[in-house]
Image: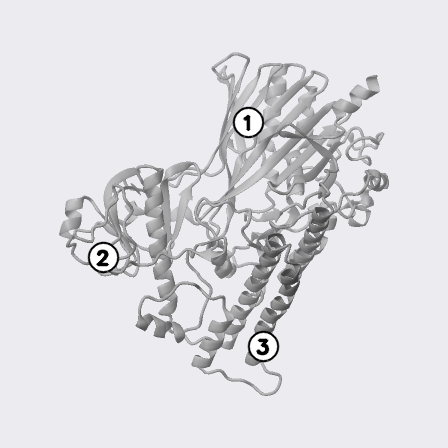
């Protein structure tokens, strides 16, 4: 048996609820990862189980540098290496084996494609072609800018590529007559329509098979970095790549009894080897059908900025037009979000193509994302949901004792996350454009009567009893959002900035929220510094769902009170989703006076040092107070809903083509304005926030305005 790697790994067993030592052998040619109870059993051919690698997906844990998973045949297998270096070597070898056998599977497919199959692949090729053209245009501008003649000629080349796709389409559907393609003709035309893979067959028979099949998009973990395909090539002996130098060795010299390749992965004790609960399957079909013949994707990460107005007069003049009349505000929040509960099964080929662009642990800032996975709002608007319970926020300032104020800060903080999810399925909000802003406010239930407006506040049309909110995208690289909220009558404010950094984890995507927030109770001169949890998108190939993870802290330097909060990710060997635990400490105390546990999107319970237990927060029973946003016709052009209105409307109508085109137009406009600023050597100036050390601070916070009034 020709193999490229063997060595010890631990595997998780559901029967023992723990890790067990096993000897693993990776067979490069067979595409099989076999395991044995010992090396001697391997020599005798007594195999304990195996994992078939064709079409498999590798995953890693962002919080554990030694474990990894292999997902195949609707099962997830869990492994643990000795350390990070050993895990990396196994993953590298496994990726090469998976790539080889996934592509070979495509070559062995013998079905005769229909005209509809051709149309679908042609549409996908056209979408990927547009992605490549857009990316290449941007890179050419910055790389060969001195050679303007070359850059100016590039759009003509784009037209030629478009003409090729158009000609193929007209060939398959001519105006006069009906063309009935033979299997051979269809194969040749389809192969020419698809992007060419740089992987070469290893023998002549493979070449013949490749020429007689329709080319298709990669459905396995093809790995592309900076545009080049990383394809492991078997060595001259035909036994695969040479083994890495470590405790993991190549057993090519050993005479191991051969095994046939099973149709499915198996274990001698089927329940002990894998955790089948890793997937969350949709029980219903999608309620809206998205056209599979035209799936487009646009690079949203290269978008840049809108022009900043010369002064702030346009902001102030536009704000002054707002009123508190009910018909002045948009009912956008009350939209039906049921359509966002669909799975991504029907778009699996596109998702798999996206996965082919990244390696495990890779930063996702340059990864192209399809429009159909977008949520119908900007990230700036999502941050506003931190204040979906504004009554809890303002109640902090009502407490007379610093201990009670800390408890209420924790209560508001833990209530702030559940409202951010509009449905059970995870979707990605729009990436805010540099200079994009979002304004809204909340009227508190007990103070809905009209009151004096705050003309110099962040939202001039809101009253002194309201909670006002403003957010701005202050940086594009890295992507940093800043937001600010206040309630004038309660003398409380909040300022925060978050830098989002995404990472690919195989079957999951991790989003690190780097930054901090500060709750300021101005009457007591107290400032509570807090951090944010990380987010994870799980099961990205079926029905994605979101969980939070990481340790967060809240502290007040003046009072000395602090809190430690842990968002627990779901362990693969059981346990509950969305768990949190928290401890609140008095000054200089090592033992907490209040312990909290539960689910951040459910019920949380508190236990005091006296032994008293009570419900701390029940998010299921808490009513969300809807924010008020001005109607689109009253908004500035660079406000979030105004900027993304065409994308939002078309996503609501499930017109993915129109949504993609609207998104593309918006991003092209921002790129053009960024080029203009660069040519004129102009620096971008933020609209409402400024940088202060490592923080971004609102220009006119309530603290500063009250201080100026006293002088």
Q: Which residue is mark 1?
A: 615
The alpha-carbon separation of the residues under discs 2 and 1 comes to: 61 Å
Q: Is residue 442 visible?
A: yes
Looking at the rendered image, the disc whose residue lies closer to the viewer, 2 or 1, is 2
Residue drawn at (58%, 25%), measured in percent from left and top? 410
Q: Position of residue 272 (x, y in %)?
A: 28, 45
The alpha-carbon separation of the residues under discs 2 and 3 comes to: 46 Å
Question: Considering only vertical position in the picture, is 529 above or below 79?
Answer: above
Sequence-first tag of 2 and 3: 2
Q: Which residue is mark 2?
A: 2
Label of residue 167 in the image: 3
Is 283 in front, or is 200? 200
**Pointers 3 and 1 in contact (CB under 8 A)?**
no
The alpha-carbon separation of the residues under discs 3 and 1 comes to: 67 Å
Is 130 in front, or is 70? 130
Residue drawn at (53%, 66%), measured in percent from left and top? 125
**Pointers 2 and 1 in contact (CB under 8 A)?**
no
**Pointers 2 and 3 in contact (CB under 8 A)?**
no
Crowdedness near tag 1: few (<14), some (14–19) or many (≥20) residues, C-alpha within 10 Å: few
Q: Quadrant of the N terminus?
A: bottom left
Q: Position of residue 405 (x, y in %)?
A: 63, 19
Is 272 in front, or is 605? 272
Crowdedness near tag 2: few (<14), some (14–19) or many (≥20) residues, C-alpha within 10 Å: many
What residue occupies the far front of the structure in this picture?
A: 146
């Amino acid at each position: 048996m020709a193999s490229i790697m063997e060595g010890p790994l631990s595997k998780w067993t559901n029967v023992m609820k723990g890790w067990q030592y096993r000897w693993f052998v990776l067979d490069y040619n067979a595409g099989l990862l076999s395991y044995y109870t010992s090396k001697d059993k391997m020599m005798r051919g007594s195999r304990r189980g195996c994992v078939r690698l064709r079409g498999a997906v590798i995953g890693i844990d962002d919080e554990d540098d030694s474990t990894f998973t292999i997902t195949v045949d609707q099962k997830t297998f869990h492994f643990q290496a000795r350390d990070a270096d050993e895990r990396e070597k196994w993953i590298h070898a496994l990726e090469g084996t998976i790539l080889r056998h996934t592509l070979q599977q495509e070559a062995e497919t013998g079905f005769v494609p229909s005209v509809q199959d051709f149309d679908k692949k042609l549409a996908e090729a056209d979408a990927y072609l547009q992605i490549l053209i857009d990316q290449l245009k941007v890179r050419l501008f910055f790389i060969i800018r001195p050679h303007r003649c070359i850059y100016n000629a590039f759009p003509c080349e784009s037209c030629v590529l478009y003409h090729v796709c158009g000609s193929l389409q007209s060939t398959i559907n001519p105006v006069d007559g009906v063309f009935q393609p033979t299997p051979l003709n269809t194969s040749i035309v389809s192969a020419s329509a698809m992007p060419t893979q740089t992987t070469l067959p290893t023998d002549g028979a493979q070449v013949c098979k490749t020429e007689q099949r329709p080319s298709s998009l990669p459905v396995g973990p093809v790995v592309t970095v900076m545009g080049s395909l990383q394809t492991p090539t078997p060595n001259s002996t035909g036994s695969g790549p040479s083994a890495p130098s470590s405790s993991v060795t190549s057993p090519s010299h050993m005479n191991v009894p051969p095994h046939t390749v099973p149709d499915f992965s198996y274990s001698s004790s089927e329940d002990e080897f894998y955790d089948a609960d890793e997937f969350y399957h949709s029980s219903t079909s999608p309620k809206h059908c998205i056209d599979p013949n035209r799936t487009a994707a646009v690079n949203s990460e290269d978008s840049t900025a809108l022009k900043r107005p010369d002064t702030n007069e346009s902001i102030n003049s536009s704000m002054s037009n707002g009123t508190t009349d009910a018909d002045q505000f948009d009912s956008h929040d009350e939209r039906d979000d049921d359509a966002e509960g669909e799975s991504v099964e029907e778009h699996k080929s596109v998702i798999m193509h996206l996965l082919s662009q990244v390696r495990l642990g890779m930063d996702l800032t340059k990864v192209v994302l399809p429009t159909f996975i977008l949520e119908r709002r900007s990230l700036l608007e999502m941050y506003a949901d931190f204040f979906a319970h504004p009554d809890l926020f303002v109640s902090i300032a009502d407490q007379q004792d610093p201990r009670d104020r800390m408890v209420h800060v924790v209560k508001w903080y833990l209530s702030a996350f559940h409202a951010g999810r509009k449905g059970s399925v995870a979707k990605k909000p729009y990436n805010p454009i540099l200079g994009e802003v979002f304004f809204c406010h909340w009227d508190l239930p007990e103070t809905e009567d009209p009151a004096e407006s705050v003309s110099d506040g962040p939202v001039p049309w809101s009253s002194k009893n309201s909670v006002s909110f403003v957010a701005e995208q202050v940086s594009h690289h890295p992507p940093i959002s800043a937001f600010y909220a206040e309630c004038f009558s309660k003398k409380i404010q909040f300022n925060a900035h978050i830098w989002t950094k995404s990472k690919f984890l195989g079957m999951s995507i991790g989003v690190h929220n780097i930054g901090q927030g500060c709750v300021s109770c101005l009457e007591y001169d107290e400032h509570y510094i807090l951090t944010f949890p990380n987010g994870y998108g799980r099961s990205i190939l079926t029905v994605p769902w979101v969980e939070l993870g990481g340790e967060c802290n809240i502290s007040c330097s003046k009072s000395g009170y602090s809190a430690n909060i842990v968002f627990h990710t779901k362990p693969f060997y059981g346990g509950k989703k969305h768990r949190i635990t928290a401890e609140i400490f008095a000054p200089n105390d090592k033992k907490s006076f209040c312990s909290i546990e539960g689910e951040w999107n459910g019920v949380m319970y508190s236990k005091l040092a006296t032994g008293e237990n009570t419900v701390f927060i029940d998010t299921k029973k808490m009513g969300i107070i809807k924010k008020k946003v001005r109607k689109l016709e009253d908004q500035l052009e660079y406000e979030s809903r105004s900027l993304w209105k065409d994308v939002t409307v078309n996503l609501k109508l499930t017109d993915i083509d129109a949504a993609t085109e609207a998104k593309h137009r918006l991003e092209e406009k921002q790129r053009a304005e960024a080029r203009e600023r660069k040519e004129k050597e102009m620096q971008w100036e933020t609209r409402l926030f400024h940088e202060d050390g490592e923080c971004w601070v609102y220009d006119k916070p309530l603290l500063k305005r009250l201080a100026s009034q006293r002088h």
